[in-house]
Amino acid sequence: MKITLTVNDQVYTRECAPSKNLLHFLREDIGLTGTKEGCGAGECGACTVIMDGKAVNACLVLAAEANGAQIRTVEGEAKDGILSPLQQKFMEHHAVQCGFCTPGMLMSLRELLERNAKPGEHEIKQAIEGNFCRCTGYQQIIEAVLDLTGQLEHKGELRHV
Amino acid sequence: MLCEFDYLEPTTLADVLEILGQGDAGVRILAGGTDLLVNIRAGLITPKALVNIKKTAGLDTFAFHPDRGLEIGPAVTINQLITNTEIARRYPLLEQCAEMLASYQLRNRATVIGNIVNASPSADMAPALLCYRAKLTLTSKRGSRKVGIAEFFTGVKKTVLAADEIVEKITIPASEADGKGGYAKLKRIKGHDLGIVGVALHKKQDYIRIAVSASAPTPILAPDFQAKDSPDYIAEQVLAAIKPIDDIRSSREYRRFMASVFVKRLLEEVRA
Ligand code: FES
Ligand code: FES
């Protein structure tokens, strides 16, 4: 079947098997490999993208279901080689180690920031409860968002820079 | 990779019923897909065709009518329920159970009805719907029938839904609105996890209703209690209604113990 969708403001039309999920479609058919596959089963959140304004696990959405949808992926964050402010804060707070969870984290947080410009710690935790990070321990990620939104009172304990 | 299947996107309920009515057991309804696609990937199901009902007119019904009560269609997601403050205020238990279900991203896709149709003993929406005595409208080409939620589940992952039927909507009586209540769920971790045991409590002026998840082959509704019944009596009756098992996530004894703790804790909360 033929599907057309918009990813980071660019329109793509491709032939696609009905059984292909959105994650594989993004990575294999249009070559956007920023979005990662961890578990492939809705557990880890590495594949999180924003579909029509909502954070979803791209491994559990068929590409066919995304026909006509607006998708945002991590590739939409940096512009002209300059990191987005959210990415910048991730870097400053050492919220990235191996980086495998980062694209999904960024998309979950991007969606959160779009519906809530000043999320509290609880809301941040809730937004990333479906994103597993095996390296940072989450604290730096939470601090990066608090700092971005002007809510970090003290310098994070684990701040490296 | 997923097995090969056809993908259908019917725009009307009549078309959905026509497809289901062909009596092909390999045809599966695709709503949120958060259970179905996982099961397909694991090779547990090998469907011939998936019928996406998210674009079908009318199946996204989600409204409160003072006479008929709250109606929820099969395309309504868990997060739609949580973010509707009016509904969350009228039916607090629905929101509490919804918030305990899976993770934020999954709740953006997972549907209320899908959680019920999947019929896991640990389904988080089941205790709320049992406490509210929800009714399901099961529709096929042959017509519609109404089934109480307590009669819907028949075993682990088993329901009375026939192969040619769809749950067209869930209706929660208006008379159950504006109660007090809560859902306590035991998990291994703070983040998203399947429940080890879950207890929901719904209190109105003169009665208390309690439902328990992950403690029997189906979610269980205990007999109604009077508002003045003692916590010990209520906990005893709830324990008599459940049949938890030993499994990899918990022992039977621990499930029983925590069910009783949760019943008493929730009673204290609503009576405070
Ligand atoms: S790859 Fe999608 S949730 Fe893990
Ligand atoms: S940085 Fe390695 S998993 Fe998060």
Image: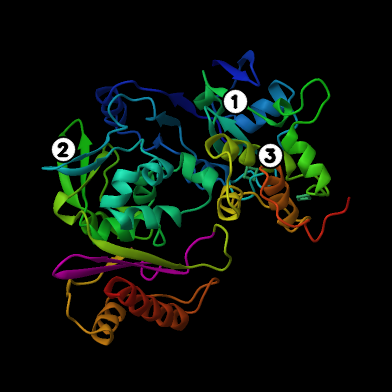
- Considering the numbered disc 1 on the image, is that residue within a helix, a strand or a loop? strand
From the viewer's side, name the closer residue of B191 and B91.
Answer: B91
Marked residue nearer the N-terminal end (1 or 3): 1
Residue B33 seen in render:
no
B38 versus A140 height, above or below? above
Residue A71 disc label: 1
Q: Are marks 2 and 3 in contact (CB under 8 Å)?
A: no
Mark 3 burial class by Cα count in 10 Å: few <14, some 14-19, many 20+: many
Q: Label 3 lies in what chain?
A: A
Magenta stretch: residue B183 in it? Answer: no
Which disc is residue A106 wearing? 3
Identified by mark 2, the residue type is Ser
Name the amino acid type tagged 1.
Answer: Ile
> Mark 2 belongs to which subunit?
B
Location of the N terminus of chain B by quadrant is top right
Q: Position of residue A87 (x, y in %)?
A: 76, 37
Q: Whole-percent x and y of residue B72?
A: 28, 41
Res. B268 image quadrant:
bottom left
Please tell me whether residue B210 belongs to the stretch shown in magenta. yes
Residue at the location (80% across, 49% down)? A93
- Amino acid tagged 3: Leu
Q: Position of residue B74 (x, y in %)?
A: 33, 38
Letter of the chain that mark 1 sits on in the rendering = A
Asked if one can make out residue B244 in the rendered structure from this viewpoint, the answer is yes
Q: How many marks?
A: 3
